[in-house]
Image (cartoon, rainbow, N blue to C red):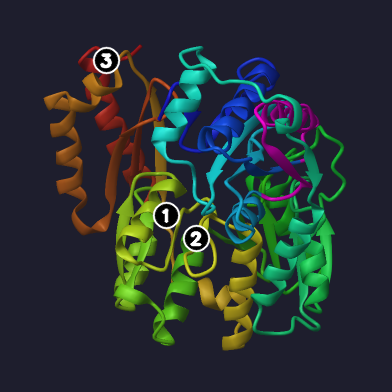
Amino acid sequence: MGKYFGTDGFRGEANKDLNFEHAIKIGRFLGWYYGARLGKKAKIVIGKDTRRSSYMFEYALCTGLMASGADAYIMHVTTTPSVAYIARVDDFDCGIMISASHNPYYDNGIKLLNGDGEKMDEETILKVEDYIDGKLEVPVAERADIGRTIDYVAGRNRYIGHLISMSKYSFKDVKVGLDVANGSAWQIAKGVYDALGAKTYVMSDAPDGYNINTDCGSTHIEHLQKFVVDNGLDIGFAFDGDADRCLCVDEKGNVVTGDHTLYIYGLYMKERGKLLNNKVVTTVMSNFGLYKALDKVGIEYEKTKVGDKYVYENMVQTGNRIGGEQSGHTIFLKYETTGDGILTSLKLMEVMLAKEKPMSELAAPVVFYPQVLKNVRVKSKPDAQNDPDVQKAVADVAEALGDTGRILVRESGTEPVIRVMVEAGTKEICEKYVDSVIDVITAKGHLA
């Protein structure tokens, strides 16, 4: 991670941590880097979510791009995966998404994607940061070389067509609930489901610039749970602000997480001979119950660091075809380069219709283990993590749990915090072992 960009873009409170000048500079650099530097005119596509500040950042980025000679293609309000898809299939030099995902409205972010629709490489990110800090100079375009903006709502429509083409079944007479989080999916998701014939029930679909993710969407799944039960729906899906993640609610109102999705679709692929390497890719935060369920059906798995970026990197390197996070980022490598909430929902619908089983039955084999996660603010993350006594305490817990649970101690990527997590048969056991490790961290004087 760089000075400004983390694992999922440059994110912070709008005009405080991330301001319009940052956006202009990012546009200035990208317009030159992919254009004049190579003796051509760069072609860059931009999307945004529904935050009020997204308009400011959109125009600031366009100003920077045009000043460096690039043409900016504006998709307007759209999803992160749509920008990734269009950057790849319509031969753009790179893509930019303006969103802070599941964060509140006053935050925003700038996510950079390369021409293959993948998250931007570290080397280019560091060059962007050097330009922001004044370590590089970029010339301005003049006369006929100055860039322009192009309305590119056609790209969003093409993406919608792509999603509709992903379904192998008609959704006729299936009652589907959609919580679009007052965000990027608010116009797209219903259009896709209506086109496929579903009886579509939508909530949180009146964005006003301030209500994105507010008491709705995948971070407040309890509202969709009630909505599905109250309306007698067959299934429900909740997206986050930029619709790159999806959580599901079955017909009984139970939550179906990203871990369940990996099991349900991974098993479906295995049964059809489509699960290359017989593996799914998880992160270290996937629940122990997922691994137990995968073991029972003979599916192997890999574990990466937290972040869909690392899941995707593993999939590219190994050829594994499905991976994701418990939070609902699921990557289907055959179709996308990033998590796509709407595509994930379509894939879960496919399994439900193909097997003619309700979602509750498909998800039932994954029984989540109780989990306790506590954050410990420390003076130095490496010192606390590498302390021999702390490591011994962690090893003692792992030995005590054996194959009945697990412990994970990791550093936060954004805060001076050590996260201590235990999964076991009961919450009381989890609390006991988490506290035993925190006691050692405290006794050794690592607390901030």
Is 245 located above or below residue 50 in the figure? below
Q: Is residue 27 positioned above or below 173 on the image?
A: above
- Please tell me in which quadrant of the rendered image residue 383 appears: top left
- Seen in the picture, residue 266 relative to 337 is either above or below; the reply is below
Residue name at image x 57 percent, y 27 percent = 29
Q: What residue is disc 2 on?
A: 331
Label 1 amino acid? Tyr
* Occupied quadrant, residue 89: bottom right
Distance from Cα at disc 2 to Cα at disc 1: 7 Å
Rendering coords of residue 33 (x, y %): 53, 33
Please report the residue visible at 46 percent of the width from the left and 53 percent of the height from the top: 325
Q: Secondary structure at mark 3?
A: loop
Callouts 2 and 1 close, C-beta under 8 Å: yes
2 or 3: tag closer to the N-terminus: 2
Q: Is residue 332 visible?
A: yes
Picture coordinates of residue 336 (x, y %)? 54, 62
Magenta stretch holds residue 44: no
Q: Nearer the viewer, mark 2 or mark 3?
A: 2
- Residue for point 13% across, 33% down: 392
The answer to whether the residue labelled 1 contacts the one labelled 3, judged by CB atoms less than 8 Å apart, is no
Tell me, for residue 312, which label it has, or none. 1
User: Start and end of the magenta stretch?
Assistant: 50-79
Q: Nearer the viewer, residue 17 or 74?
A: 74
